Amino acid sequence: ADRMNLFDGAIVLLSIAELTVLSGGAGKAVSAFRSVRIFRTFRVLRVTRLLRALDFMQVIIRVISASMSSFVYIALLLVLFILIYSLLGMSFFGGKLDNDEMGIRQNFDSFGNAFLAVF
């Protein structure tokens, strides 16, 4: 764990150096600091490694991944309902609402506006 703290400290110091150099106007001359961004992603990936080590997080991740297939069907059903009510709104209210009283998107004159109004 001590090595990772040194790694984090070095990345933070390099990031501060990058900010000071790039804010000074010499941003085009020094492009070596751009590689620091790759190391920043390694810092983020370290958190995912920590999450894999925890047993209860593995259970939660398994449950979420198992429920995603059910979520897809519910989302498709929701989109189907929005589609049906958008078409019904277009047939009932298309061209009948005054745009001066309402905003430009709150009408049923086109499918895109109807979809946004129902959503």
Image (cartoon, rainbow, N blue to C red):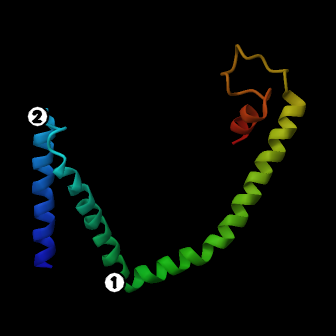
Task: Examine the rendered structure and indicate whether residue 105 appears above or below residue 32.
Answer: above
**Residue at x-position 68% and y-position 65%:** 72
Q: Quadrant of the N terminus?
A: bottom left
Residue at the farthest top position: 100
Residue 111 vs residue 11: left or right?
A: right
Helix, strand or loop at disc 2? loop
Label 1 sits on residue: 53
Residue at mark 2 to residue at mark 1: CA–CA distance: 43 Å
Label 2 sits on residue: 24
Task: Examine the rendered structure and indicate whether residue 83 appears above or below residue 38.
Answer: above
**Residue at x-position 39% and y-position 86%:** 55
Q: Position of residue 14 (x, y in %)?
A: 12, 55
User: Toward which corner of the image does residue 2 lie, by quadrant?
Assistant: bottom left
Near mark 1 (Cα within 10 A), the count class, few <14, some 14-19 or many ≥20, is few
Look at label 1 and name its amino acid: Ala
**Residue at x-position 14% and y-position 57%:** 12
**Residue at x-position 73% and y-position 17%:** 99
Look at label 2 and name its amino acid: Gly
Helix, strand or loop at disc 1? helix
User: Toward which corner of the image does residue 42 lie, by quadrant?
Assistant: bottom left
Q: Position of residue 73 (x, y in %)?
A: 72, 66
Q: Quadrant of the C terminus?
A: top right
Q: Position of residue 71 (x, y in %)?
A: 66, 66
